[in-house]
Image: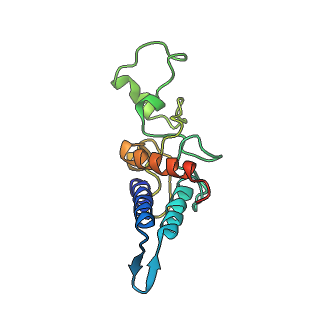
Amino acid sequence: MQHVTSIAFLLLTYANYLSRTSQYVNCGSIAIGPASLRAQAKKQVDYILGDNPSKMSYMVGYGDKFPQRIHHRGSSLPSIVDHSEFIACKEGTIYFNSSNPNPNPLIGAIVGGPGEDDIYEDDRADFRKSEPTTYINAPLVGVLAYFAANPDV
């Protein structure tokens, strides 16, 4: 998802630049304009949110099917309400190794997502696919803010 969210952000940024300067990008004999770039960025967001071969949203808590076992310490440990004792670093291993869904869903987090084969196993130990990171989530915040402010795009 790192590339998907970053590219969507860049597409919107460049589309806005082209729009303000009344320009197009020539790709061979095809002229690509701001509307086309915005449409491509929206397709990327739609993919992240479930319009993909797995019909799975890669945003925790969004839609009917989303990651349940993300690679995130705070999300994979029990709540202080359920486990009031201190959990030291090594004591968290039993929760990390559990196949149960995370007890504290990190709602809104985007995980690394599927591999090139569009397969996502929802495995906490597969950090490349299941870890939410700032460099994945930050660009998407900008993209979602743009589409929220411009719902007709």
Whole-percent x, y for residue 106 in the image: 50, 35
The one nearer the camera, 94 or 19, is: 19
Q: Locate residue 27, reporting x and y percent.
A: 40, 80
Residue sitting at x 51%, y 21% = 79
Residue 51 vs residue 38: left or right?
right
Q: Where 63 falls versus 88 (above or below)? A: below
Which quarter of the rendering shows the N terminus?
bottom left
Give the percent coordinates (x, y) of residue 93: 39, 29
Q: Is residue 126 visible?
A: no
130 vs 152, nearest the viewer: 152
Residue 21 vs residue 142, the one in the foreground: 21
Give the camera-side residue of 96 and 25.
25
Tell me: residue 119, above or below residue 124. below
Q: Residue at x 54, y 62 (%)?
A: 43
Q: Residue at x 48, y 34 (%)?
A: 98
Residue 101 appears in the picture as rendered: yes
Instruction: Indicate the quadrant containing the C terminus: top left, top right, bottom left or bottom right.
Output: bottom right
Spot the residue most to the top. 85
Residue 49 image offset from top left, x and y in percent: 57, 52
Which colour assignment does the render follow?
A: rainbow
Q: Residue furthest bottom?
A: 29
